Image (cartoon, rainbow, N blue to C red):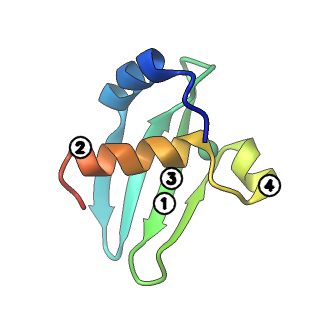
Amino acid sequence: MQCTVEVDEKKLLEKVKIFKSGGTYVGIIPSFSKPDVNYTVVFDLASSHISCTCPHFVYRQKPCKHIGLFIKAMKEKGFT
Ligand SMILES: [Zn+2]
């Protein structure tokens, strides 16, 4: 986990949208580097599996900063 983008992260956190769809939570997470790009984080409640559509996650299959932001936003919005 990186903690070097605290200020930007707060701004990004405001843009995060989360909604529940059946047994999953879906988060629309803004890209950290590209203002016009959003990634989608999907959290499956039954399996606790979480995934992101960004290249970093697709390539490495490891939690990326969008997932970190998603989890923070979930807590902030009272989803957890
Ligand atoms: Zn990602």
Question: For residue 33, what is the image quadrant?
Answer: top right
Ligand 1 is in which quadrant of the figure? top right
Amino acid on which disc 2 is placed: Glu
Q: Secondary structure at mark 1?
A: strand
Q: Is mark 3 within 8 Å of ligand 1?
A: yes
Q: Which residue is mark 4?
A: 60
Q: Residues within 10 Å of mark 2 (few under 14, many from 20)?
A: few
The Cα–Cα distance between marks 4 and 1, rounded to whole angstroms, is 16 Å
* Whole-number angstrom distance, CA of label 2 to CA of label 3: 16 Å
- Local SS, label 2: helix
Q: Are marks 1 and 3 in contact (CB under 8 Å)?
A: yes
* Mark 2 or mark 3, whichever is nearer to me: 2
Q: Which residue is mark 2?
A: 76
Amino acid tagged 4: Arg
Distance (Cα) linking label 4 and label 3: 15 Å
Q: Position of residue 40 (x, y in %)?
A: 52, 48
Q: Which mark is residue 41?
A: 3
Residue designated by label 1? 42
- Bin the neighbour count of mark 1 within 10 Å (Cα to Cα): few under 14, some 14-19, many 20 and up: many
Determine the secondary structure under disc 4. Answer: helix
The nearer-to-camera label among 4 and 1 is 4
Pinpoint residue 80: horizontal percent, then vertical percent: 24, 61
